[in-house]
Amino acid sequence: MHKYHVFVKLCRTTEEWTRLPDMPASRGQISFAGYAEHSDGRRGVVTAGGAGDASTDFLDLDTLVWEPRAFLPHDLMDGASVPYRGSFLAAGGFSADQGGFQVRPN
């Protein structure tokens, strides 16, 4: 399984990609990612889930610092997310904890 922790953004004006601070941990088969606005005014990007992973991280777009957030109810991978009112909705996916898939030895 491939795991990635690199994070980049696209500047729409210049059409150039800029590397942002790497995610704190690699996420194989990341489940959810989306833009979020917090009640305290902070704006950022949330990444959550992955193969065997229920953690959530938030990248503050003003400070470019990652911070941990509340865990998902259980590990989720291969889900989808859609924008919703300054945040996003997460749906679907598979869970190893909940018997959603079986790992088979090679």
Image (cartoon, rainbow, N blue to C red):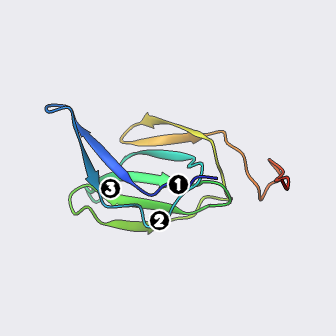
Q: Secondary structure at mark 1?
A: strand
Of the residues shown, which amino acid type is indicated by label 1? Answer: Ala
Marks 3 and 1, how far apart in space? 20 Å
Residue hosting label 3: 39
Residue 48, numbered label:
1
Marks 3 and 2, how far apart in space? 15 Å
Side of 28 relative to 39 (left or right): right
Residue 69, numbered label:
2
In depth, the one of 85 and 68 nearer the eye is: 68
Mark 3 vs mark 2: which is more N-terminal? 3
Do the residues under discs 2 and 1 have CB atoms within 8 angstroms? Answer: yes
Does 52 appear above or below 17? below
In depth, the one of 74 and 50 nearer the eye is: 50
Q: Position of residue 71 (x, y in %)?
A: 57, 64
Identify the residue at horizontal 28%, vertical 52% (top origin).
19
Side of 82 relative to 106 (left or right): left
Does 35 appear above or below 25? above
Mark 3 vs mark 1: which is more N-terminal? 3
Of the residues shown, which amino acid type is indicated by label 2? Answer: Arg
Do the residues under discs 3 and 2 have CB atoms within 8 angstroms? Answer: no
